[in-house]
Amino acid sequence: MEIGIVLAMLAAGLAVTLPCIGSAVALSQVGRSASGLISEEPEKFGKALLLQVLPGTQGIYGFLAAVLILQEVGLFAEEMLEVSAGVGWQILMASIPIAFAGIMSSIMQGKVSSAGISTLAKKPEETGKAIILSAMVETYAVIALLLTILILNGITV
């Protein structure tokens, strides 16, 4: 197998794995906070669940980037394209924004969402503000995904 395609596969792997790790860590953190709350006030489950799922989106963004990378090299076509080492390195570099911003923003968003569970516990009428604060962290994962897409669109295989 050519080194270019190996690098592209590594890029797809990093693009999805790192954000998914971050999302799993964050979902676990928020889930632990939410579990304590809903054991006392089960009627708050819906709002707690909304706060919990927010940091899971980075994993989805990473998956989208990985699919775009695999599409770029023709994995979904009848025959994969020949990918030079130089192009493979370009694709690997394109995966870096979503891979690293995805893992960090999901973990940080988990911390904000977990704090939002405290808001939900004490002042449930302010939950919307907690959701907005958590969503603000996600902005940087979206920017990273867009940059990954723009770089991929500039690569000619």
Image: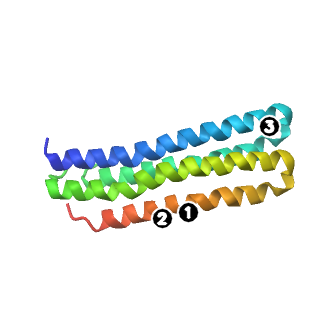
Gap in angstroms between the C-alphas marked 1 and 3? 27 Å
Residue occupying image coordinates x 48% and y 48%: 103
Q: Amino acid at mark 2?
A: Ile
Task: Where is residue 61? Give x, y as percent.
Answer: 47, 53
Residue 50 visible: no
147 lies left or right of 155 = right
Q: Tell me the crowding category of disc 1: few under 14, some 14 to 19, or many 20 or more residues within 10 angstroms, Cα based.
A: few
Q: Quadrant of the C terminus?
A: bottom left
Residue occupying image coordinates x 83% and y 35%: 42
**First in residue order: circle 1 vs circle 3:** 3
Figure disc tally: 3
Above or below residue 9? Residue 129 is below
- Whether tag 2 and tag 1 are in contact, CB under 8 A, the answer is yes
Q: Which quadrant of the structure image shows residue 135?
A: bottom right
**First in residue order: circle 3 vs circle 2:** 3
Gap in angstroms between the C-alphas marked 3 and 2? 33 Å
The residue lying toward the viewer, choosing from 63 and 133, is 133
The residue lying toward the viewer, choosing from 127 and 69, is 127
Residue occupying image coordinates x 59% and y 48%: 55
- Whether tag 1 and tag 3 are in contact, CB under 8 A, the answer is no
Q: Amino acid at mark 1?
A: Thr
Above or below residue 105? Residue 21 is above
Q: Which residue is mark 2?
A: 143
Q: Which residue is mark 1?
A: 139
